[in-house]
Image (spheres, rainbow, N blue to C red):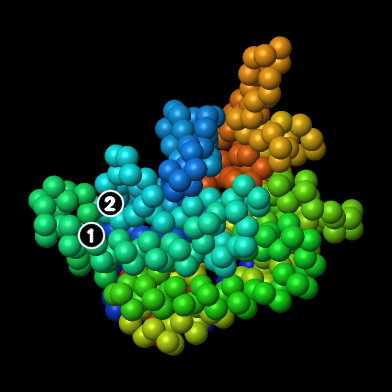
């Protein structure tokens, strides 16, 4: 495993060696965001398809369930806010949605590669990245037909030119790694299929480019070995736990995935000459947050704020919002902590709103991006 200081140093060194922007460094005017991903950026997709993420999800900001597996807002919400756009509605959500400024195709549990299991068998979403692409393709085509047909749709659907001027965001890949481990694959076996995962990812980016997409903001995957649902479910030895309490083997695989993803991005820039593609190192940001929690203002780094029992306050059979029957009555046992803002992990799998905001604050300025440009300048290409 590469030492984390070496990862960050290497990143900084690579950023200083980048070329100059092809176009000016003025702020971009993104009229819309189209997002693809998993639960890290799902704003209601899985909830629309399989039932709402129940309370206490959403309690810190929305004061009730809002389709997010979090106590409040996600990084994608803060991205939309910073660009002056409304929060993204999930493409799958038919109730009260307005897609004028984009759409969110992400669903919790999504993978890049389709999984040969059902949601109830494995916990992985049937809406893999290729399905999200099919949905986007259909959305792109049909919205223009409807906008020209009825005036009411002009207030609900994006303009034709918004698709070429939009920001296309990606945060997906984590579940592809954990899926292998949950099928009892070895680390070598998981690493072996990473090229295929990224080949399928590459195809989707190229397809969006083919439909006019030009600005891409791509997050790498986070330190999965620091999440309770991994630490609790997968076997690790004491020697495999680092000073932050994270499982080294799983973080090693995440870093391997990220190195390969960065290579893919470099090649995509060559293959798609009109595209501005930003690679965002959220791994380094999240690991810094977890490994130095108190320095960054958090009290709990690894334990889940909302859950029940065990070393990490996580139980895969009785999660956040979980209830049991006592004398015929339902009793809530998967309770949230008193102050989610002091915790990094929300439910054993996802980050709290406070942690998401901290992560966003680190990446919005471009300090962890390749090329090192702020979010608001992500439409500009670098030579």
Residue appearing at x 46%, y 55% in the figure: 106
Depth order, front residue of 14/162: 162
- Residue 380 quadrant: bottom left
Residue count near mark 2 (Cα–Cα under 10 Å), binned few <14, some 14–19, many ≥20: many
Residue count near mark 1 (Cα–Cα under 10 Å), binned few <14, some 14–19, many ≥20: some
What residue would you read off at disc 1?
Answer: 143
| Looking at the image, residue 192 lies above or below residue 342 | below
| Looking at the image, residue 330 lies above or below residue 150 | above
Residue 19 locus on image (x, y percent): 43, 83
Looking at the rendered structure, the secondary structure element under dot 1 is helix
Depth order, front residue of 210/218: 210
The answer to whether marks 2 and 1 mark residues whose Cβ atoms lie closer than 8 Å is yes
Depth order, front residue of 213/345: 213
Residue 329 locus on image (x, y percent): 64, 14
Looking at the rendered structure, the secondary structure element under dot 2 is loop
Q: Which mark is residue 99?
A: 2
Residue 147 locus on image (x, y percent): 15, 57
Q: Quadrant of the N terminus?
A: bottom right
| In-image side of 272 versus 198 (left or right) | left
Q: Quadrant of the C terminus?
A: bottom left
Q: Is residue 375 visible?
A: no
């Amino acid at each position: 495993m590469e030492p984390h200081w070496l990862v960050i140093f290497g990143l900084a060194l690579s950023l200083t060696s980048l070329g100059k922007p092809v176009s000016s460094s003025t702020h971009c005017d993104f009229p819309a965001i189209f997002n693809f991903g998993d639960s890290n950026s799902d704003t209601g997709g899985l909830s629309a398809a399989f039932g709402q993420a129940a309370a206490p999800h959403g309690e810190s900001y929305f004061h009730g369930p809002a389709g997010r597996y979090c106590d409040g807002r996600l990084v994608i919400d803060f991205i939309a806010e910073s660009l002056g756009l409304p929060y993204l509605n999930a493409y799958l959500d038919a109730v009260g949605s307005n897609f004028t400024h984009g759409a969110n195709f992400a669903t919790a549990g999504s993978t890049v590669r389709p999984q040969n299991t059902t949601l109830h068998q494995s916990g992985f979403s049937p809406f893999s990245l290729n399905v999200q692409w099919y949905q986007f393709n259909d959305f792109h085509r049909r919205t223009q037909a409807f906008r020209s047909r009825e005036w009411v749709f002009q207030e609900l659907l994006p303009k034709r030119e918004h698709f070429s001027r939009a920001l296309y965001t990606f945060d997906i890949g984590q579940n592809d790694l954990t899926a292998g481990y949950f099928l009892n694959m070895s680390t070598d076996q998981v690493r072996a299929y990473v090229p295929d995962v990224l080949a399928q990812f590459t195809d989707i980016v190229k397809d969006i480019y083919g439909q006019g997409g030009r600005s891409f903001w791509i997050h790498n995957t986070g330190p999965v070995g620091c999440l309770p649902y991994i630490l609790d479910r997968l076997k690790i030895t004491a020697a495999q736990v680092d000073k932050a309490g994270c499982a080294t083997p799983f973080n090693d695989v995440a870093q391997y995935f990220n190195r390969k993803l960065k290579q893919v991005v470099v090649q995509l820039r060559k293959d798609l000459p009109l595209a501005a593609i930003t690679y965002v190192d959220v791994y380094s940001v999240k690991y810094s947050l977890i490994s130095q929690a108190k320095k960054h203002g958090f009290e709990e780094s690894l334990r889940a704020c909302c859950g029940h029992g065990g070393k990490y306050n996580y139980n895969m059979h009785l999660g956040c919002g979980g209830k049991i029957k006592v004398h015929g009555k339902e009793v809530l046992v998967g309770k949230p902590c008193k102050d989610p803002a002091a915790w990094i992990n929300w439910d054993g799998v996802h980050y709290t709103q406070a942690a998401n905001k901290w992560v966003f604050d680190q990446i919005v300025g471009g300090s962890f991006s390749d090329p090192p440009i702020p979010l608001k300048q992500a439409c500009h290409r670098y030579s």
